[in-house]
Image (cartoon, rainbow, N blue to C red):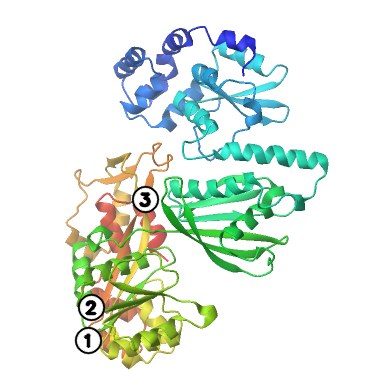
Amino acid sequence: MIPATLSALSAREPVQGVAAAAQAPAAGRYHSLVEQGFLRQEELALATAEALRKRVDVATVLMDRYRIPKPAIGAALADFYRCPFLAYDERTVMERELLKDLSLDYLRMNHWVPLRRQGKGVEVLIDDPHNPDKLLDVRRAFPGQALSYRVGLRRDIEQCLSAVHGRESGDAITDILGELVSEAQLEEQQNATIAAITENDSAIVRLANQIITEAYRQGASDIHIEPYADRKETSVRFRVDGTCFTYMKIPAAYRRAIVSRVKIMASLDIAERRKPQDGKIRFKLSTGQEIELRVATLPTAGFNEDVVIRLLTTNGPRRLEELEFSSETRRRVGNLAQKPHGIVLCSGPTGSGKTTTLHAILASINTDERKIWTAEDPIEITQDGLRQVQVHPKIGLTFAATMRAFLRADPDVIMIGEMRDKETADIAIEASLTGHLVFSTIHTNSAVETVVRLLDLGCDPFNFSDAMLGVLAMRLCKRICQNCREPYHPSREEFDELVQAYGASDWVHLHHGYDPAFTLFRGRGCEACNQTGYRGRVPIHELMVVSDRMKGLIQARVRTGELLALAKDEGMRTLLQDGIEKVTQGLTTYQQVRAVAIK
């Protein structure tokens, strides 16, 4: 609990006294927002009055009612107080040791919180670094210590305190890390060995569970656990919307314990650290929902092991209409799916949505009249009506062996998880030529390059060209956050860049000219998207349908450029063109399209 002096201070009705005092200099505090054109002076006065009436701070009204972005408000506060601004970041780990003698209710009422130690001092987040009463309280809480201040918003300070208190779903990361840090410090003092820390320690078990829970809550596709040698902290990184960021650090003494805990959960050999291992975890969330995790371990420098955990979707198949195809591409994909025999390939890098797309296509033709077999590694999406086989290369049940078995099991449609070698490709071609419709994925950069890749594998160009129906290439771009999306009129240079990238001769068909009505969109940045302006992802597609003329070019083994020219003449839109069309629709930005669609 807080000392008696601070208990007495908390009883001074700060809501009225401090709140009223805080509103008075609001005009000066946020005057730079008026100068920068975010709002007018009379609007600032109205916001100040509304804040007094609702008994909230002015910043809350500016963000909620006038849609002023948090970075702009933070810059205004930093300029006014001559103090760095700090926004709330849920990845920040606070030192619980600083809070052990302080009441959370008191801190909430007075709007400040100690964050971390810096050398011999303490860094404090506070909403008003000029308030003498609050500064006196901080000095009483940390007597004789050097204090450095960061200015923050009241709602951010509240979030920091809520994170310390812990979420309803279970233990807070900060609570568990507080235990680990304390234990690690104690271990160093007592010269204990690393071997004394086991993967069965309660804190390690709860930390591993909470990392997975937090990754799922944030929509991460992958978790990376990265230990280092020389007593450096272990990094835990999440990949969200295709981008990695460091989520937290774990004390070095626990690097092997956290890795061993994950390996136990995945039923791997914890004694084997010299070679890679793969496994799976069925993890139950606090809500009762089960998710599936794919685990891969790799030996790294310093006799360590890295762990990569892929969070697999356990939802059913999506419909083709949900995959944001252009109307023409969706029509042509639907036509290919109705063919009685042939091969349809879906290409793209790992995590680009190939499996999701193929299952959506299969769902559109999944009827009682068709027998559909799939061979997958792993089975990420399940749907009734499909007979799905999990391949096991270690026991000889490879994609090729499974395909041979399918041909003896009366199939109409076959889906093979990946076409990665000549043997699998040859069996797929044989299956298509004997009256079966075959779907598969392949790792290539574009639809046209898929043809060259299969020819390089050694496939017969005549059989292959006869079997091939089409190739669908895919990428995923970051989607503009729908919460803070705003229109803008691009510059002439930006417009010309779009036209040049799309192709001037093709651009005329879009009927977009450079005039005042031409509008693009961008994300301003908000709390929902962590001030990035992007949230979620949008797919872009490139569909090449193999015509009789193209079959002749494939048999002649012509260059990629000739195949591309013919495909475009026959109506194929490239990944870049489809992406630019989604830019004009306000779904993403050209910078994101260019990042994934240009080699």
Tag 2 residue: 370
N-terminal-most mark, 1 or 3: 3
Q: Type of residue at label 2? A: Arg
Q: Quadrant of residue 550?
A: bottom left
Tag 1 residue: 548
Given contact means CB atoms under 8 Å apart, are the residues at marks 2 and 1 in contact? no
N-terminal-most mark, 2 or 1: 2
Q: Is residue 6 left or right of residue 582?
A: right
Q: Residue at x 54, y 12 (%)?
A: 131
Q: Which mark is residue 427?
A: none
**Looking at the image, is mark 2 or mark 1 nearer the viewer?**
2
User: Whole-percent x and y of residue 504?
Assistant: 25, 63
User: Whole-percent x and y of residue 142?
Assistant: 68, 19
| Callout 3 secondary element | strand
Q: Is residue 255 left or right of residue 419?
A: right
Q: CA distance from mark 1 to mark 3?
A: 39 Å
Which quarter of the image is occupied by the C terminus? bottom left
Q: Is residue 424 left or right of residue 163?
A: left
Within 10 Å of disc 1 (Cα), the crowding (few <14, some 14-19, many 20+) is few
Within 10 Å of disc 3 (Cα), the crowding (few <14, some 14-19, many 20+) is some
Asked whether residue 501 is in view, the answer is no
Tag 3 residue: 536
Furthest residue in direction right, as rendered = 191
Q: Is residue 17 above or below residue 264?
A: above
**Looking at the image, is mark 1 or mark 3 nearer the viewer?**
3
Which quarter of the image is occupied by the N terminus? top right
